[in-house]
């Protein structure tokens, strides 16, 4: 009886808990969606804060270098420092001022990046494929797909061996950047990331694209130098690449046929020279005039019989 009384008195607790949980779940989901849309903007603001902190440190270093120069100049006037010490302190001040100006310019550039990221901020009803992380992962997949074309296409493997050679410097740089980008890549486009993690992954993808472009240009330069690709051939394009692959295949087939023909001629010459009882055969074919071409042998004519069987001695075989 007491249980039913408690239920009758506190029946409103269950709907309140359910409602609170639903509101909290929708709030968290909406917050995650907003964070995913603002990820590039938040990353730009994060980098702006870092740039401002670094620039403030550079300005403090300029003040320290200026005070150090004043101290050395005072000691030089008192005879406790040399002119080389003054020159060294002045050069240090010039270097600090140069670094401070460069970092201040970096802060201004980062402010422009923040404004650009705010301008292209996607709306709440945007396609998930247009979110910053999804677009970044698509760019990463595009570079990987371009590299796999050189790894899985036999014609490209023959024409561009540099793209698969880890000893090539630019290819080694690309593979190192590829490993870094793969390590920083999230599991999916819905994976929560902090602005710092997104900025690190974005910079890794940018370096990956730049290193792949450099390695690809070097591979095409080697291919043109070796003759696998004509000098006037443009850099990778889908319709013209089929022509390049066809030319490479035809060249390989022609070279293979030439090698097989030379090996066959050498084998036939060796067989004729090793035949017993025959005189050495001159490999040079007889000269014939165009007016009297030699008659071709009959295709079905049997070879002449060899009798008696050649012997090592000059003794004639007994008659039967």
Image: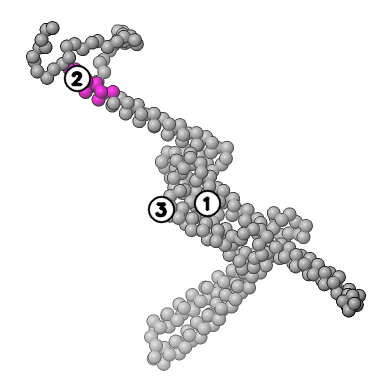
**Residue 191 x/y as whole percent:** 66, 62
Range drawn in magenta: 268-283
Kindly state the secondary structure of the residue where label 1 is placed.
helix
**In the displayed structure image, the side of residue 46 where residue 300 appears, left or right:** left
Give the label on residue 276, or none.
Answer: 2
Q: Residues within 10 Å of mark 2 (few under 14, many from 20)?
A: few
The residue under the point 42% across, 80% down is: 88
- The residue pinned by badge 1 equals 213
Return the residue nearer the eye: 96 or 316: 316
Select label 1 or label 2 by which is in front.
2
Mark 3 or mark 2, which is nearer the start of the sequence? 3
What residue did someone put label 3 on?
167
- What is the C-alpha distance between the residues marked 1 and 3? 17 Å
The image quarter in which residue 105 lies: bottom right
What residue do we see at 25% from left, 15% from top?
A: 286
Mark 1 residue crowding within 10 angstroms, few (<14) / some (14–19) / many (20+): some
Local secondary structure at mark 2: loop
* For residue 274, above or below residue 130: above
Determine whether 48 is above or below 130 in the image: below
The number of callouts visible is 3
- Spatial CA span between label 1 and label 2: 65 Å
Q: Nearer the viewer, mark 1 or mark 3?
A: 3
- Estimate how packed mark 3 is, as few (under 14), some (14 to 19) or many (20 or more) residues with alpha carbons within 10 Å: few
| 119 to the left or right of 247 | right
Camera-side residue of 298 and 311: 311
Tell me residue 57's x, y (percent): 56, 78
């Amino acid at each position: 009886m007491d249980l039913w009384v408690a239920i009758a008195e506190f029946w409103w607790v269950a709907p309140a808990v359910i409602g609170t949980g639903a509101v909290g779940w929708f709030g968290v989901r909406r917050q995650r969606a907003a964070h995913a849309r603002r990820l590039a903007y938040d990353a730009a603001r994060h980098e702006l804060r870092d740039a401002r902190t670094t620039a403030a440190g550079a300005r403090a270093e300029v003040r320290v270098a200026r005070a150090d120069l004043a101290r050395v100049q005072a000691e030089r006037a008192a005879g406790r420092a040399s002119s080389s010490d003054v020159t060294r302190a002045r050069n240090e001040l010039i270097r600090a001022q140069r670094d401070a100006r460069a970092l201040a310019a970096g802060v201004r550039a980062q402010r422009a990046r923040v404004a650009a990221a705010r301008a292209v901020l996607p709306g709440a009803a945007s396609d998930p494929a247009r979110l910053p992380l999804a677009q970044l992962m698509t760019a990463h997949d595009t570079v990987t797909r371009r590299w796999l074309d050189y790894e899985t296409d036999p014609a490209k493997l023959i024409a561009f061996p540099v793209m698969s050679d880890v000893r090539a410097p630019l290819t080694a740089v690309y593979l190192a950047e590829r490993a870094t980008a793969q390590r920083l890549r999230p599991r999916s486009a819905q994976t929560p990331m902090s602005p710092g993690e997104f900025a690190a992954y974005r910079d890794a993808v940018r370096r990956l694209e730049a290193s792949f472009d450099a390695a690809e240009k070097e591979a095409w330069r080697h291919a043109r130098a070796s003759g696998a690709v004509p000098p006037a051939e443009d850099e990778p394009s889908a319709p013209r690449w089929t022509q390049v692959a066809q030319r490479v295949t035809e060249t390989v087939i022609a070279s293979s046929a030439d090698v097989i023909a030379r090996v066959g001629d050498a084998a036939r010459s060796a067989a004729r020279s090793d035949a017993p009882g025959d005189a050495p055969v001159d490999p040079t074919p007889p000269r014939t005039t165009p007016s009297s071409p030699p008659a071709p042998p009959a295709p079905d004519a049997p070879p002449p019989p060899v009798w008696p069987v050649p012997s090592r001695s000059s003794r004639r075989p007994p008659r039967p």
